[in-house]
Image (cartoon, grey):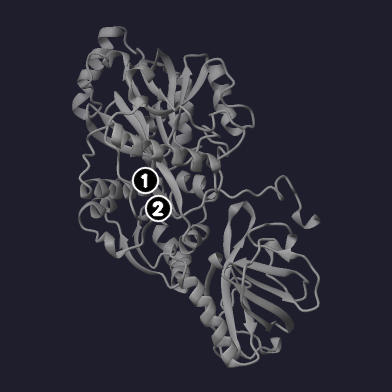
Amino acid sequence: MERPGRLLLLSELHVGNAACDVSLSRSLLTWKRRGSSGPVYHPFRPRFCVLWFPWRPDSGVSHSVPVSEIISVREEEEESRGRDDGSWKKIRESEGKDCRQAFTVLYVERRQQHRWRCAEVTFTCPEGALRQHWVGSIKEQLAAIASRPKHLLVYINPCSGKRKGKRVYEEKVAPLFAQAGVSTQVIVTERANYARDHLRTEAELKKFDGVVCVGGDGMFSEIIHGLIWRTQVDGGVDPDCPDEALLPGSLRIGIIPAGSTDCICFATVGANDPVTSALHVIVGDSQPMDVCSVHHNNTFLRYSVSLLGYGFYGDVLTDSERKRWMGPARYDLSGVKMFLTHHYYEGTVSYLPARGIEGTPRDAARCRSGCVVCQHNGQQLSEKAERYEVDEASDSERDSEWRTIRGKFLAINAASMSCACPRSPKGLSPAAHLADGTTDLILVRKCSRFDFLRHLLRHTSKDDQFDLTFVEVHRVRRFRFTPRHCQSDSDLDLRENGKHQIFSQICRDHPACGCAPAYSSWNCDGEILTHTAIDVRVHCQLIKLFARGIEESTVFEDLPNPCAI
């Protein structure tokens, strides 16, 4: 048990009809039935079956809650609202509580599969003055937590997923924000890139402690493009220069999952659950995250935080865009189609290896809450950056450090995080880190359909993703890609006005009708890039999210019946 430090309050209070010793320190709120010698239950350390049930006064368990995970405290009136069964109700007179002398503490309780819920416990004091003292002390401790947001700017995408974004926010998130005393300015977007454009030009960011997006990965992409661009322009940094070190933003970003794909939320929280994400925002969690800037010929294209994919994943996205009427099922159909088509592409990949860091792409360890690899590498990079400001040039940027690979590839992927999702619990690169200043460059060379299927199936198994002769992976800080037919023509454009140029090149090299295409498209976090020749650079811990990374839960792993403990 963590040492609670000096006690601020210690009283005998009642929970239901049971007398309990209740104590408050700067770090913990603890209550235990008098005369009980039972174990201590930590909602943040799942050890007992009681994890999934409300605390019972007769359970004989000492319950301890971190002050940082208390949502709010309120004094009870004649009619009080309870949450033991998840609904509003009156406190029953049969419980023997004097409502005029009772107060309720709402706190975070952990459930299965990394989900959080809002639990509560009501204490009855022997006198009103003592209740006021307890409520005032708890509120004072909560107010002292500087990381908690008080004013949030919320963007809701009403068209995300199954058009449920607005309902999810109003029914599940807004009541929690109100209970925690968090004020919000809510904006429902009217078109694509509305949030991005509003953040760039109109939003008064100084009024807020954070920005929350309600939607899928596309909505999150709009938010980071607006915030990062605004930060660079305000700081005098040219976003079009690929060699510029970008300025980190001051506002954290919250993600309320309500889209068809919520990979970012799943990778940073461990669950696609709106209530869990809202509670992470309320308690003021902070998770740094790397961002990749993508340029073409000194022109900024996009930012990426999860996956850059050329070849297979680019083709799947391009084909699925023609089938949007099918909904999420279009990805499955396009995936099967592209697998059977089995296109490969020639080109040159140049990359700058990540030197002197902890961790490799084939580590068994995973990026989890409080990741020491991210902390170590992030600190190391910040120290190097300070030295380079004096030395003007970084040794790692010298030409001698670059490595070059030429060949025929079925897929070229850059994973800045594991890219795990419910369908692929391990993701494309299981050992990738959220905030270590690197991306895992995965090269899948030309091979048979059977071998490529083996590679794809390993995304859903426990086998080593990269233990195949035609797959190689490199942890890099920067990389460049040039398609073969683009090496003397770096202005290749995949937009509509460039199609004639592409097909004329294809016909020159492959005269027969029905020949394989010479170029794929880049899939950048679910968006198609307009160029194939790109320069990608990782910016370490450029943004921060209202999250803490996926928490370890080893006790209940592979346990079919947790109540059997």
**Rendering coords of residue 287 (x, y %):** 46, 50
Q: Quadrant of the N terminus?
A: bottom right
Q: Is residue 523 above or below residue 226?
A: above
Residue carrying label 2: 215
Label 2 element class: strand
User: Quick one: 6 or 557, which is closer to the camera?
Assistant: 6
Total numbered labels placed on residues in the image: 2
Task: List the residue tagged with mark 1.
Answer: 218
Q: Is residue 544 above or below residue 8?
A: above
Circles 1 and 2, Cβ within 8 Å, touching? The answer is yes
Circle 2 residues within 10 Å: few <14, some 14–19, many ≥20: many
Q: Amino acid at mark 2?
A: Gly
| Residue depicted at x 81% and y 71% | 37
73 on left or right of 313: right
Q: Is residue 243 visible?
A: yes
Q: Amino acid at mark 1?
A: Gly
